[in-house]
Image (spheres, rainbow, N blue to C red):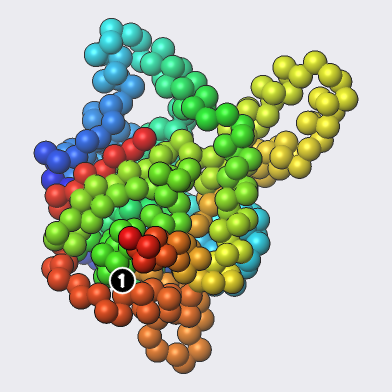
Amino acid sequence: MMAQASEKPDRKELTQAIKAQALKVGGDVVGAAPVERWDDYVPEGYRPYDILPNAKSVVVVGARGPTMGSWRSPDSRVMEVNGYDFANDRAIHVVSDFIEQQAGYYAMQAPGLPTSGHQPPFSMMLAAVLAGLGTRSFAANIILNPRYGLLYYSAAITTADLVPDAMLEQDVCPHTMCIATYKAIGKTPCLATCPADEGGCLDGSIGEGGCIEEAFDNRERCVSRAMNFGINSFQKALTDIVNEDDGETRNMMINSDFFTRSCASISFFKESVAQCFECMRVCPVAARHRELQQGRRGPCRSFLSIQRLTRNTKIKFSRCHSRSRSTIRSG
Amino acid sequence: MTPDKRKPGLSDEQIAEKLGLGRRTVAEIRCVGERNYYGVDEWEKAQEFKEKQCRAFAERGVSASTKKYVERRKVE
């Protein structure tokens, strides 16, 4: 049992208690970062202490989304509605309450959802990197955790001074399997799945050091896929509907599957986030968490073709370190 | 990435300062620009892409994505 608010626990004890709580209430990973780490990465107005005065630390919780069964479904609509269940949001809410009620420090859920276009007041992706939970990837800059791959992140900003976690020294992306694939065919699996030069979202290159040399993500197209049904699609369909002169056509548009799903996404919200998983589906990082192994060793069945493809490819790259010489572009 | 190599986007405040506009004006222009970038047909195409890709992976694994590039390399 933690000390009550009147008798504050020491820094290490408090950090451990918060982390234990986060894992207990649904987080798969948890990390802490001092607020000063934001100074080099974001402009004034978007730092933790701009949101909560006198903030000292940020606690970041990551949770897995789809179950292995959902990953196996051949119907993409399953993932649109089942892919994300807000486990990280629930956990961070409990963590914030815990910090205030048990430790006596201010805490608040960091505001992750966009309040102005696509721009969130606080980046959960950056928070995850700064708390040592992952690094950016070729796949739309998604933060990959070395153990779990794709995770959903939430953060709590607090006035408590916590013991920080070190940022990851080694990039999670590209995986050695992807480096070999890139060498063989000029694309990693994610870049081959959603290539920007063929109507997709992603492009990039791996440098001599085996790290991301350049990464491109067509963000607006990615929005159309990852947030296929939601506010965007509702607004676009509504524009077409109000500009349609023919009453019968207008009626069909209003009752169409596309507009109905757009309305449902707004009503139930859950359908409006994380609706495209195709670049992550082919990512070898933590693929074992997407496919039951049942005693098997070696790569997952879905990745055997890569193993064959790269069998004779010698990897001469030495693995690079994070904060490397890469350039991230966004279209 | 080291700070000297990063190419972060500008905040609305930074854009406003550069252009001599109000922050809210910049935010409105940006939001409309983001929403209008692609028409509704891109959202329709997104469904086709995901349905096709998801089923292909269920049937053939990662080779559903990489095979065409392997064949292109063979031709080269």
Q: From this viewpoint, is residue A111 visible?
A: no
> Which residue is at 45% across, 51% downward?
A194
> Which residue is at 45% across, 61% downward?
B68
Q: Where does the image place residue A2, in percent across and percent down from the top left?
A: 34, 65
Element assignment for label 1? helix
Outermost residue to the right: A248
The N terminus of chain A sits in image quarter: bottom left
In the image, A314 versus A78, the foreground residue is A314
For the image, the number of numbered tags is 1
In the image, A248 versus A143, the foreground residue is A248
Outermost residue to the front: B75
Q: Where does the image place residue A21, in percent across and percent down from the top left?
A: 40, 65
Chain letter of disc 1? A
What residue type is disc 1 on?
Answer: Met
Q: From this viewpoint, is residue A208 visible?
A: yes
Q: Does A105 appear above or below A243?
A: below
In the image, B11 versus A59, the foreground residue is B11
Residue that carries the numbered disc 1 in the rendered image: A177
Q: Where does the image place residue A149, in percent across and percent down from the top left?
A: 38, 65
